[in-house]
Image (cartoon, rainbow, N blue to C red):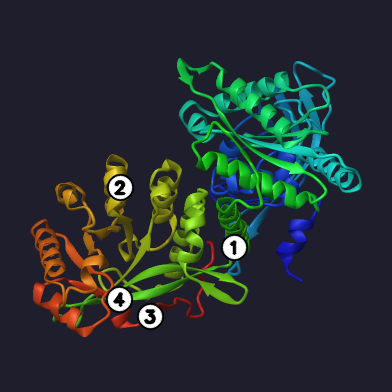
Amino acid sequence: MRADWIVSGLSQAILCTDSEVNICYLNPAAEQLLAVKSSDVCGKPVSEALGLKDEAGGMLTAASLKDLCSQGHEARLRLLADGGAHEAELAAGVSPVHDGAGEQVGYSLMLASHTLSNLDNAGAVSHLDPLTSLEGRKEFEHRIDNLVNDAATSSRTHALLYIDIDQFKLINDTSGHGAGDNLIKVVGECIQDELFTGDLLYRLGGDEFGVLLSNVDAFEARAIATRLVKAVKRINFNWGNISHRVSVSIGVVLIDQYSLERQTVMSQADVAMYSAKDNGRDRVHIYDVQDKNLSRLHDEMDWVHRINEALSNDDFCLVREHIVSLGDDTSALSYSELLLRMKYKGELLSPGQFMPAAERFGLMPQVDRWVVNAAIAYLRANPQLKPGENMFSVNISGQSLCQEAFLEFVYRKLRRGHVDPGLICFEITETVAITNYSVVTRFIERVHELGGQFALDDFGTGMSSFGYLQELPVDFVKIDGLFVHDMDTNPVHEAMVRSINDISHVLGKRTIAEFVERDSVQDKLRDLGVDFSQGYLHGRPAPLLDGRAQANS
């Protein structure tokens, strides 16, 4: 029996952090207690993501958690919302977490609701959401069960409206968590004002709400959902002299005789809501089993659950693909790119099978964190690897490069990971680098200060980007395989490779040709003076495992 199954099934709320107090894991009981989804907060600092403070109201830091561990008795924490007008007091048992070598790698917190204090209403009831005073997910799920049972035994139909605030993260990030809390409250009040007697509104966590409508048909459900979309759109939300446009996307699911269980209904509502967002946000989408687009979206969302499980269960692994020097120097750099695979039902899945869903649903920063942690853990476990003799490339996605918190995470890891940053080369794509030019340039400069290096991946797809190449302080340019794979038979592609290589060398950057699969291609590359060759000619990617650790540090 696996330990994670037991932890997930516990009624005790459990929260785990790394040594820097970034959230690593919440079990379902913790998600319910804190009214959040694990996928929304993992990788973020505890105080920032949860509004969780110490008893005195201070930020939870590594030092404060260490003090709570040393006290040896139950601690008191404060869960704040709505600028402090609502406050839940939590009882917490804090323990250090150690890895197999005995090194402390984080903390575990066992949480329980202690008291609820509402400064405006001393009679508040603890099962209500402290921010909106609405019923929460537990009561919502119980009510869906009742409606499913009723629909199965009668001719009545009901409806679930799954509501998500559009661009909530943008408002939260630009105006702060106080603005985010206030917006959730305002939207909840707006929706409540539009509902009729008997229509039930719930807060499901984060920026999500659920509405349950009894004894309605599809036409009535759509009409009510459309009315809610229009009402929210009329909200004039200002915070800190900034005016924010507010809208919601709503997925609608009918609960009828064919609705077999709550989980199916909620999954369908989730898919319908994401489809509303895909179609432009600020709109309603009704789930239809015949809709092929919804079926595709449903499949992608199934991958989201698998990815989250893989992150929780450490079911990823790294493989390495050799990058071979084309020079004559026998002491050339031993260079490899580290690639990600996902373990699923006894197989290793390639990124093409799960990465599109991770990108679509914003999971790449969490995936990238796993890769960075695993790469550093591997290097730390292999102290014989030396900069100048060895180097490993690690890919960073565009989603991660847009997050200041992720960039700070990488910077801290390089400073405190007990490995030489000169062993690591971060790969970023040409498109992402140009789109986020100032952010990427600043990040490259900071990592260069520590000794790390950068490669510009997939270069050449946009020839207008040659101008940016002079400004971007990258160390390597990877020539897109689109031009490389047939350059031995395609003179145009050969000319493109020659141009990219020559300009890169003039700018002092080394070049790597991707998708090299034939000796004739490699001979051409060597003749042109390309520095490195990468592709199946040098073997398929092989497991990185050599009996050393490669899990999260």
**Left or right: 11 in relation to 526:** right
Spatial CA distance of label 1 from label 4 is: 28 Å
Q: Earlier in the sequence, mark 3 or mark 4?
A: 4
**Left or right: 488 in relation to 444:** left
The label nearer to you, 1 versus 4, is 4
Residue 160: quadrant of the picture: top right
Q: Earlier in the sequence, mark 2 or mark 3?
A: 2
Circle 2: is it few (<14), some (14-19), or many (20+) Cα within 10 Å?
few
Residues tagged 1 and 4 counted as in contact (Cβ below 8 A): no
Q: Secondary structure at mark 1?
A: helix
**Left or right: 295 in relation to 459:** right
Q: Earlier in the sequence, mark 2 or mark 4?
A: 2
Spatial CA distance of label 3 from label 1 is: 24 Å
* 293, above or below 208, in the image: below
Q: Which residue is mark 4?
A: 535
Spatial CA distance of label 3 from label 4 is: 8 Å
Circle 4: is it few (<14), some (14-19), or many (20+) Cα within 10 Å?
many
Q: Disc 2 residue type?
A: Arg
Q: Which residue is mark 1?
A: 310
Q: Which residue is mark 2?
A: 446
Q: Which residue is mark 3?
A: 540
Q: Earlier in the sequence, mark 3 or mark 1?
A: 1
* 202, above or below 418, in the image: above
Where the N terminus falls, by quadrant?
A: bottom right
Closer to the camera in the image, 417 or 343: 343
Q: Disc 4 residue type?
A: Gly
Q: Secondary structure at mark 2?
A: helix
* 270, above or below 329, in the image: above
Spatial CA distance of label 2 from label 3 is: 33 Å
Q: Earlier in the sequence, mark 1 or mark 4?
A: 1
